[in-house]
Amino acid sequence: MSDATTPSSDNPGFDDMARDIAEVPAVEVIVTVAVNLMSAAAVKLGLTEEGEAHKDLDEARKLVQALAGLLDASATEISTFHASPLRDGLKSLQLAFREASLVPDAAGQGPGEKYTGPVYG
């Protein structure tokens, strides 16, 4: 490990950050990451006030795909209490992607649908 990547006393906040992260339950980390992916996907789909200014369907596809993979991989680790609203949000993003696409993907071929199955409106 190089000196640039080794935590040292030159960076006193590092120990505090590591301690803070260590105290966060895994479920909370997973849900936070999922919400961040959902928010970023919504922006890239043009669903914010500024809409078209940030719209980028290629980026949105990647974010929705990552969100679907995260939810699929963590399904047994997070409770239904957490998973249900995240799945609902994912489905909404998948439908918004389909609507925003000039040439919609075939059923089952949209972003994340390999994890969720085909999404219909």
Image (cartoon, rainbow, N blue to C red):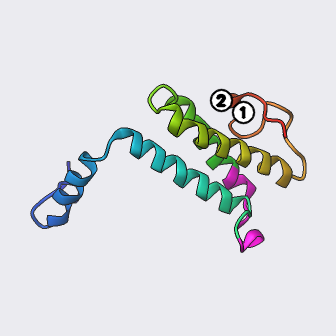
Q: Secondary structure at mark 1?
A: helix
Query: Where 89 sits versus 74, above or below?
Result: below
108 relative to 63 in the view: left or right: right
Residue depicted at 78% across the width and 50% down the height: 97
x and y, in percent, of residue 40 in the image: 60, 58
Query: Measured from the top left, where is residue 58 in percent x and y?
Result: 72, 53
**Span colored in magenta:** 49-60
Q: Residue at x 30, y 47 (%)?
A: 24
Residue 11 seen in this snapshot: no
Q: Secondary structure at mark 2?
A: helix
Provide the major secondary structure of the magenta segment: helix
Residue bearing mark 2: 115
Quadrant including the C terminus: top right
Tell me what residue is drawn at x 68 percent, y 30 percent.
116
Q: Of the residues shown, which amino acid type is indicated by label 2?
A: Tyr
Q: Looking at the picture, how far across and down is residue 68, in whole percent?
A: 61, 38
Q: Residue furthest right?
A: 103
Does the magenta segment cover residue 101? no
Residue 79 in the image: above or below residue 2: above
Rendered residue at 87%/44% (across/down): 104
Furthest residue toward left: 9
Residue 99 appears anywhere in the view: yes
User: According to the image, label 1 marks what residue?
Assistant: 113
How many residues crowd mark 2 within 10 Å: few (<14), some (14–19), many (20+)?
some
Q: Are marks 1 and 2 in contact (CB under 8 Å)?
A: yes
The crowd level at tag 1 (other Cα within 10 Å; few <14, some 14-19, many 20+) is: some
On the rendered structure, is 43 left or right of 121?
A: left
Is 51 one of the magenta-colored residues? yes
Towards the viewer: 99 or 88? 88
Q: From the viewer's perspective, tell me whether residue 112 is left or right of residue 75.
A: right
Q: Mark 1 is on which residue type? A: Glu
What is the CA distance from the residue labelled 1 to the residue labelled 2?
Answer: 5 Å
